[in-house]
Amino acid sequence: MKATINRRTAVGMMLAAPAILRSTKAFAAKELRVMAWDGYADDDWVKEFNEQTGAIAKVVFIGTDDEIWAKIKGSEGKDFDTFAVNTAQLQRYIDGGLVTPHDLDKIPNQKDVLPLFRDLTKVKGVMRDGKVYAIPFCFDSIGIIYDKDKVNPPPDTFETFWDPKYKGKILAYDNGEHNFSFTALTMGIEDPFHLTDDQMAKIKEKLIALKANVLSFYTTPDEALQLYKNNDIDLIWANYGQQQVKAMKDAGANIGYVNPKEGALAWLDTWALTSGVQDKDLAEAWVNFLLQKKISGQLSERTGFGNTVVASGSAGPNDKLVWLDFVENPTKRSDLWNEIKAQP
């Protein structure tokens, strides 16, 4: 899901650098070992960090959650100092003793993030036993893209996907886990990630009805864009959120984006410290450095993802976000989804 798209000039002013990053170069000649998704540690940011601290940040980019786990678990946390990880995946690192808690006093920019992410006791998955194991950095919601020329007023509920007037004019995402989760939200199920057999059976029937309304299921943002260009499409279930919105707008699509009132599934990527962190102060200086308005603004403009410092299109102040979690039985969801797709 993480991919860099077009790059444009950033907006916003940089926060005043904390004492730890001033011209004293407190970390001269020290090395910081970073593991990040593409778009989370761009060359210009790394250069600026190195110049401000006197340290040398060396970044390894990764492509999957499993790759992160293999590298951290394989070295028992000793090969890296800090890494980007989503809140759902973070839990197994905490369980395995592979991460070190943050000292918030060393990350003063956390006090100036968006209200949604300021009180970490209210951000699911970043704390355990009163300790902060991760600092929110980047996120996106999974909402509804609608064609402004064809859908008026804008939709405000997932139930719109089942409206007969949009039959054959909908694109949906080809994924059993997410489809069961968002449909559970639509049906008012409080916990969409831990479903009973009875709930799954009812959701299956509703998804079969959805399939009858959907023109096609897509797997990548580019595939969805091509389907949109070549067909009469009114609504898209936007698995790739603002990244997908940006790509479509860059292609000239007249679209809008909403997070429905039932709540939108959302992923949250954070910065965590490994159990083998060599210089904790330097690693926290890196996290603090990235939580600047300038860099966060650039992150969203370059990738389309939401950030935790500067407001973006990923979520409004009143939007309900439901942070992704491990589901009760991925294999069962996948099997049921294949049965749904096989329906005539």
Image (cartoon, rainbow, N blue to C red):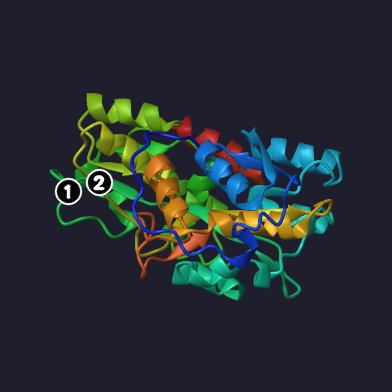
Q: CA distance from mark 2 to mark 1?
A: 6 Å
Viewed as shown, does residue 36 lie left or right of 340?
right
Kindly identify the amino acid type of the residue bearing the numbered disc 1: Val
Task: Name the one closer to the observer, 54 or 111.
Answer: 54
Label located before the other in sequence (2 or 1): 2
Task: Name the one closer to the observer, 149 or 329.
Answer: 149
Above/below status of 342 relative to 319? above
Res. 74 in view:
yes
Residue named by callout 1: 151
Q: Residue at x 29, y 36 (%)?
A: 248
Label pair 2/1, CB-CB below 8 angstroms: yes
Q: How many marks?
A: 2
Task: Name the one closer to the observer, 38 or 229.
Answer: 38
* Circle on res. 146: 2
Task: Name the one closer to the observer, 223 or 11.
Answer: 11
State which quadrant residue 287 falls in.
bottom right
